[in-house]
Image (tube, rainbow, N blue to C red):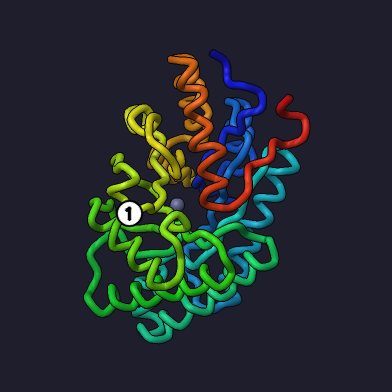
């Protein structure tokens, strides 16, 4: 079956860079049938941000890229901003751990103000280094994450979590941490999820699955919220480090070809989960849909 014209095709997590392919990658996504991108900020320079102003400049670059993609590739883009959790690890030896943590908190406050101003739809990526770090740095990362949760509660938005792979009990402790902070588990999204964990075992935390063929097929029968993402990095120095930006629409087409039921199930990651986590449904860009 072909994909219905009224079905949005959503990549829930990618990055674009002014030094990479940028709009050309988004055009490839659109040509493959993609309609919506959640565009997460990233550090666009080789230096780690050292001030809130550095983060403001970074977020503005993400916003500019999103605007360019909307205008030139004709797809909808949702901006996601936060200080990258690994920045804390890199900034700590330069600024001192306390100042590096303070900078994370201030940049999270800035990200929260962007959500209030409707310049961003979520805080991301927030969370923890995906590699071993000294205990005091890990503790500081936990404090930064708790601040992210507090901001998300105050501005009423989701958090997109960066972390190592999570076992079911780790998903559940994430859900508890959110609940203690006043953030419901469905507002917490584990991004770059590489193994399928049923919703019940995730304690209600949403999963954004890497759009590998096997994983997409396995997740397809599951109730939401869950998403598909590429985590496309748009880094010319690391081609093939992550999935290509055209992957989600290609998977959607393949799943739709496989069965009529597959087409219906795709409404879970592309429509229903967006509504459950963000509180609104993705609108099809003008000129698409029927
Ligand atoms: Zn990412």
Q: Which residue is mark 1?
A: 203
Residue name at image x 52 percent, y 73 percent: 151
Q: Front-most of 182 and 1? A: 182
Q: Give the vertical position of 157 relative to 73 (above or below).
A: below
Percent across and percent down for residue 19 are: 57, 50
Q: Front-most of 285 and 25? A: 285
Is any atom of residue 229 visible in this view? no
Q: Classify the position of the N terminus by image quarter.
A: top right
Residue name at image x 28 percent, y 73 percent: 138
Query: Would you say 229 lies left or right of 38 here?
Result: left
Percent across and percent down for residue 268 are: 49, 35
Query: Would you say 86 lies left or right of 103 here?
Result: left
Percent across and percent down for residue 79 are: 61, 54
Residue name at image x 42 percent, y 45 percent: 208
Q: Classify the position of the C terminus by image quarter.
A: top right
Q: Give the vertical position of 156 relative to 39 (above or below).
A: below
Q: Front-most of 119 and 92? A: 119
Percent across and percent down for residue 222 are: 38, 35
Q: Give the vertical position of 95 relative to 17 (above or below).
A: below
Is any atom of residue 38 visible in this view? yes
Residue name at image x 61 percent, y 33 percent: 8
């Amino acid at each position: 079956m072909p994909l219905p014209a009224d079905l949005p095709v959503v990549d829930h997590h990618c990055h674009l860079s002014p030094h990479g392919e940028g709009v050309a990658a988004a055009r490839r996504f659109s040509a493959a049938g993609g309609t919506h991108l959640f565009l997460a900020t990233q550090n666009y320079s080789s230096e780690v941000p050292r001030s809130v102003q550095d983060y403001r400049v970074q977020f503005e670059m993400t916003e500019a890229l999103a605007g360019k993609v909307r205008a030139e590739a004709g797809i909808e883009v949702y901006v996601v901003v936060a200080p990258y959790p690994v920045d804390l690890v890199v900034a700590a030896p330069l600024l001192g751990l306390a100042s590096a943590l303070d900078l994370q908190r201030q940049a999270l406050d800035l990200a929260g103000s962007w959500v209030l101003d409707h310049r961003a739809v979520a805080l991301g990526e927030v969370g923890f280094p995906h590699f071993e770090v000294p205990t005091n740095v890990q503790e500081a990362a936990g404090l930064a994450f708790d601040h992210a949760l507090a901001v998300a509660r105050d501005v009423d938005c989701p958090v997109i979590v960066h972390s190592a792979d999570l076992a079911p009990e780790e998903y559940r402790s994430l859900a508890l941490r959110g609940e203690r902070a006043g953030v419901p588990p469905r507002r917490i999204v584990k991004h770059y999820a590489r193994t399928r964990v049923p919703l019940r075992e995730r304690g209600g935390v949403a999963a954004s699955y890497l759009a590998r063929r096997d994983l997409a097929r396995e997740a397809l029968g599951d109730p939401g919220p869950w998403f598909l993402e590429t985590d496309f990095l748009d880094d010319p120095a690391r081609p093939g480090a992550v999935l290509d930006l055209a992957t989600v629409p290609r998977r959607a087409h393949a799943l739709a070809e496989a069965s009529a039921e597959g087409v219906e199930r795709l409404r879970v990651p592309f429509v229903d989960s967006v509504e459950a986590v963000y509180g609104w449904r993705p609108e099809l860009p003008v000129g698409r849909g029927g």
